[in-house]
Amino acid sequence: MDITLDEVIEMLEDIQEDIDYENCTTLIDDRMLDSFDILAIVSGADEEFDVSIPAKDIIPENFNSAQALCALFNRLASED
């Protein structure tokens, strides 16, 4: 099962709704998401997509955009 960008954006909007996830590529760099949001993303990935994010993957590059998160979730889902 592929996780779609729309599904990832929907999850992100539940966490922080005032961000343009389709176009933003600096979610972490510009501090639009904080550490609590990252914890919510990690938890949401597990709950909604059954994807566990290992600590080594919790890096800004993977969380700077919805596209990067979508790629991360799909990579981790395919490794299981």
Image (cartoon, grey):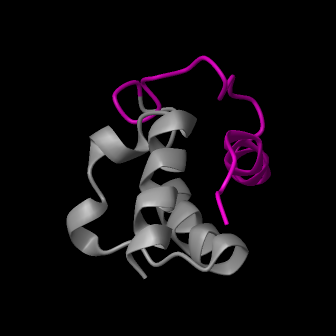
**Vertical order, 43 against 29 (above or below):** below
Identify the image quadrant of the C terminus.
bottom left
* Magenta stretch in the rendered image: 1-30
Residue 40 is drawn in which quadrant? bottom right
Q: Is residue 42 above or below residue 64?
A: below
The answer to whether 14 appears left or right of 23 in the picture is right
Q: Quadrant of the N terminus?
A: bottom right
On the image, which quarter does residue 16 sit in?
A: top right
Q: Is residue 57 left or right of residue 16?
A: left
Residue placed at 75% from the left, 30% from the top? 18
User: Which residue is rendered at x = 41% and y = 35% of the image?
Assistant: 64
Rendered residue at 42%/54% (across/down) = 72
Residue 22, percent across and down? 66, 24
- Residue at 58% x, 78% y: name it: 46
- Residue at the farthest left position: 56
Where residue 67 appears, x then y in whole percent? Answer: 53, 35
Q: Is residue 68 magenta?
A: no
Q: Position of residue 44 (x, y in %)?
A: 64, 69
Q: Nearer the viewer, residue 61 or 14?
A: 61
Task: Look at the image and say whether residue 19 sits in the magenta stretch.
Answer: yes
Q: Position of residue 20 (x, y in %)?
A: 69, 22
Image position of 22 with respect to 40: above or below: above
